[in-house]
């Protein structure tokens, strides 16, 4: 999984959960509000009905008092009760009538109106007669009974509404708890995913880097977590493996140089032993070759150490050229003459043009390249044979080609010859080496604006050609 995907998935799931929770809560609150409003209206209706009952009773009572005492305050109280009856009737009509209690409502309305109509027919404000009182009382009983029926219908309806409110409240509570739990679970799942894919792999990577930094070169980062972290871990492991391989090769070079240095040093020691202070000096004709040998072996050690330092310099990008104009024929001749005495099994040949071949170069470095090419030509033709060094001018270029009739190089290896530490499996077995000579030679040729090319056939020999701008 990619970091972008994890971030997008976490944000989207948390946002969806939050939205779900919020809309669930809003829905619960809205339906609670609706049910509570409904209950509130019913309470108002119940109150209106009860007020109506009270005022119908009060109207009837005051009417009876008027008949008995004929006092005007009772007539006023009766009229006030009548106004109240009408007012509460209006109030009741203003409330919504549900289909269930519509018959009870219209029956109560009719009965109340009939009662008021009977009272008006009996003379309204005048003291009622006994017969009128009896008729009015019957009408009042009818209205009261109708109001009672409406009241019980309303109370029943209120019970149902209350049960509904309880249900909605329980449902809304359950929904809120479920939404909060889902939000909590979503947050925990996101945190767990972040810990699993991001935090722990990061810690493991950091620990591997720390271990590597503390000197444990076999420390490797585990490949886990997000794609980006896995890529970093793979890159770190590849880098650590490459460094380990380079270290191994560098140690190999050191071991090989130390081994190579032992031969000239052993020869030097043997020769110097013969010149110990407690022994008489040998005669001059023996002394001179011994001193020449000491000089030769010391020069060999010096050359090996210079080569090693050059490699270090090239690796560090510090190759410095001291250019001057030299005759390329002279450089080739010097190298061949250097190797001729030692290469007794080989026929070292030189092919030079007639006139001088001027070349602007660092002669020490170019000799180093030619030394390497000639040394390889001898080294990789163990059976002896011709080794030819040919100088030529080709257009704007000067070429120096070194050919041998040695083991040759397989075609598939030729492209990799100038890589650092590469040794061709076919020819590498023939002689010891570390695979740095051609790499250094190619870097030197490139520093001069030139290159080295190879043509070779296995079993037939090879030609390495140094091309330099003339
Ligand atoms: P080294 O000789 O120390 O291995 P070089 O960089 O000089 O290193 O050479 C790299 C490889 O190229 C050698 O290991 C060998 O396989 C191949 N090679 C170089 N010169 C020749 C040659 N003249 N004939 C055959 N193979 C050669």
Image (tube, rainbow, N blue to C red):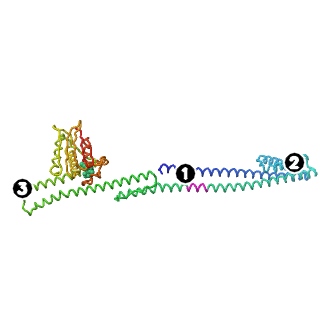
Query: Viewer-nearest of labels 1 and 3?
Result: 3
Q: Which residue is tagged 3? A: 285
Q: Residue furthest front?
A: 459
Mark 2 vs mark 1: which is more N-terminal? 1
Please state, as top left, top right, bottom left or bottom right, where the C terminus lies in the image. top left
The front one of 74 and 397 is 397
Residue 374 placed where, x, y %? 21, 48
Residue 393 placed where, x, y %? 21, 38
Q: Is residue 452 left or right of residue 264?
A: right
**Could you classify mark 1 by the number of other residues whose Cα lies within 10 Å: few (under 14), some (14-19), or many (20 or more)?**
some
- Distance of mark 2 from mark 3, alpha carbons? 165 Å
In the picture, residue 351 is in which quadrant? top left
- Distance of mark 1 from mark 3, alpha carbons? 98 Å
Q: Is residue 202 left or right of residue 20?
A: left
Residue 182 among magenta residues? yes
Residue 348 placed where, x, y %? 17, 47
Q: Which residue is tagged 2? A: 114
Q: Residue at x 12, y 61 (%)?
A: 273
**Could you classify mark 3 by the number of other residues whose Cα lies within 10 Å: few (under 14), some (14-19), or many (20 or more)?**
few
- Distance of mark 2 from mark 1, alpha carbons? 67 Å
Secondary structure of the residue carrying tag 3 is helix
The circle drawn on residue 13 is 1
Query: Viewer-nearest of labels 2 and 1?
Result: 1
Magenta segment: 177-185
């Amino acid at each position: 999984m990619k970091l972008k995907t994890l971030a997008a998935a976490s944000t989207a799931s948390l946002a969806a959960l939050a939205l779900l929770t919020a809309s669930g809560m809003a829905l619960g609150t809205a339906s609670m509000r609706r049910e509570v409003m409904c209950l509130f209206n019913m309470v108002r209706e119940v109150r209106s009905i009860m007020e109506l009952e009270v005022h119908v009773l009060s109207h009837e009572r005051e009417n009876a008092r008027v008949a008995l005492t004929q006092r005007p305050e009772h007539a006023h109280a009766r009229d006030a009760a009548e106004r109240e009856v009408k007012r509460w009737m209006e109030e009741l009509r203003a409330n919504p009538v549900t289909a269930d209690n519509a018959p009870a409502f219209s029956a109560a309305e009719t009965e109340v109106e009939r009662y008021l109509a009977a009272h008006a027919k009996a003379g309204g404000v005048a003291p009622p007669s006994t017969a009128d009182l009896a008729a009015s009382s019957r009408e009042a009983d009818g209205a009261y009974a109708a109001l009672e029926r409406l009241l019980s219908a309303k109370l029943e309806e209120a019970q149902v509404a209350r049960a509904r409110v309880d249900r909605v409240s329980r449902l809304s509570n359950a929904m809120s708890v479920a939404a909060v739990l889902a939000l909590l679970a979503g947050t925990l799942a996101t945190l767990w995913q972040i810990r699993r894919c991001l935090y722990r792999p990061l810690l493991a990577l950091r620990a591997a880097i720390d271990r590597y930094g503390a000197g444990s070169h076999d420390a490797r980062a585990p490949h886990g977590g997000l794609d980006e972290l896995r890529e970093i871990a793979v890159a770190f492991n590849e880098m650590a493996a490459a460094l380990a391989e380079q270290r191994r090769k560098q140690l190999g070079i050191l071991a090989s140089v130390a081994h190579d240095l032992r031969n000239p040093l052993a020869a030097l020691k043997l020769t110097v032993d013969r010149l110990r202070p407690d022994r008489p000096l040998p005669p001059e004709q023996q002394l001179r070759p011994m001193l020449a040998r000491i000089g030769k072996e010391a020069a060999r050690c010096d050359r090996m150490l210079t080569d090693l330092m050059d490699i270090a310099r090239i690796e560090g990008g510090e190759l410095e050229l001291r250019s001057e104009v030299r005759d390329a024929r002279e450089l080739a001749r010097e190298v061949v003459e250097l190797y001729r005495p030692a290469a007794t099994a080989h026929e070292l040949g030189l092919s030079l043009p007639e006139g001088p071949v001027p070349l602007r170069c660092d002669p020490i470095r170019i000799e180093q390249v030619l030394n390497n090419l000639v040394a390889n030509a001898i080294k990789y033709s163990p059976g002896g044979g011709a080794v030819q060094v040919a100088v030529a001018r080709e257009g704007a270029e000067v070429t120096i080609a070194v050919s041998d009739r040695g083991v040759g190089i397989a075609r598939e290896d030729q492209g990799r010859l100038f890589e650092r530490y590469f040794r061709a499996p076919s020819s590498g077995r023939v002689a010891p080496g570390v695979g740095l000579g051609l790499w250094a030679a190619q870097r030197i040729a490139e520093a001069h604006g030139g290159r080295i090319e190879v043509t070779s056939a296995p079993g037939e020999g090879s030609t390495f050609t140094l091309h330099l701008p003339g």
